[in-house]
Image: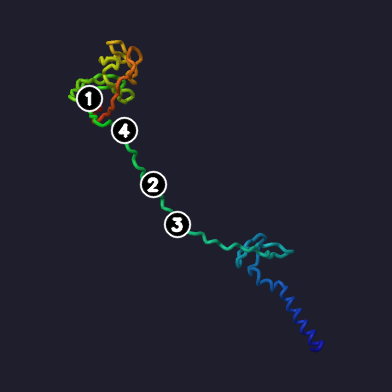
């Protein structure tokens, strides 16, 4: 290659490189829209460009690559869970289960023993064999004791807050049946009791 040809080739290469560095060449990589004011923002080819002042001209900055939009999964409407029906609590029996060989007797009507009062009943049931029962309703709960004193089985009577055996002056607490004075040392015998349809039922044994 002659020196002239070599110079011509170098001239062509230099011209091509200079053209790449010219603003027109860079335009392909920048927004074609001309900025109109400082701070103007546009989105172009996945970048955000902001207008800047360069000398007396407005130019776009190098641009900031925007993150690719994430596809937000469509939130499926979660069905409101249906509350499981909690089982109704079984009614707690007010008394313990009756022993084998026991039976229930209708002693009186519920209205015959007002709240805070004590009454003595002798049921007509032949199985009672003439036995008497002391019923006390306190705070709407029924308490039942045998009418006979635990000293010598004399019947007790109601005297205020106590049950008194006039045979030997033993005194019992009408709510607990515990002797509080006198020769009796054992509490009065208690019975299971429940109310059904306005009647008071006492459980006794044969």
Marked residue nearer the N-terminal end (1 or 3): 3
Residue bearing the label numbered 4: 93
46 or 95: nearer the eye?
A: 95
Marked residue nearer the N-terminal end (2 or 3): 3
* Residue in view at x 67 percent, y 71 percent: 27
Distance from Cα at disc 1 to Cα at disc 3: 66 Å
Q: Image height check: is 164 above or below 67? A: above
Residue bearing the label numbered 2: 83
State if disc 4 and disc 1 touch (CB < 8 Å).
no
Residue bearing the label numbered 1: 107
Residue furthest bottom in the image: 2
Numbered badge on residue 173? none
Residue bearing the label numbered 3: 76
Marked residue nearer the N-terminal end (4 or 3): 3
Q: Which of the 4 quarters of the picture holds residue 37?
A: bottom right
Tally of numbered tags: 4
In the structure shown, which secondary structural element does the residue marked by tag 3 occupy? loop
State if disc 3 and disc 2 touch (CB < 8 Å).
no
């Amino acid at each position: 290659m002659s020196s002239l040809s070599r110079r011509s080739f170098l001239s062509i290469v230099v011209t091509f490189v200079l053209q790449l560095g010219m603003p027109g060449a860079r335009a392909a990589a920048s927004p074609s829209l001309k900025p109109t004011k400082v701070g103007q923002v546009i989105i172009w080819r996945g970048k955000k460009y902001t207008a800047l002042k360069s000398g007396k001209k407005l130019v776009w900055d190098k641009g900031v690559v925007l993150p690719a939009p994430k596809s937000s999964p469509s939130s499926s409407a979660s069905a409101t869970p249906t509350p499981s029906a909690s089982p109704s609590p079984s009614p707690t029996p007010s008394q313990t289960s009756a022993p084998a060989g026991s039976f229930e007797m209708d002693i009186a009507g519920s209205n015959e023993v007002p709240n805070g009062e004590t009454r003595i009943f002798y049921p007509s049931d032949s199985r009672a064999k003439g036995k008497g029962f002391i019923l006390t309703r306190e705070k709407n709960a029924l308490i039942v004791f045998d009418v006979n004193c635990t000293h010598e089985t004399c019947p007790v009577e109601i005297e205020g807050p106590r049950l008194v055996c006039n045979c030997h002056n033993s005194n019992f607490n009408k709510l607990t049946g515990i002797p509080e004075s006198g020769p009796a040392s054992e509490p009065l015998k208690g019975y299971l009791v429940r109310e059904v349809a306005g009647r008071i039922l006492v459980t006794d044994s044969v």
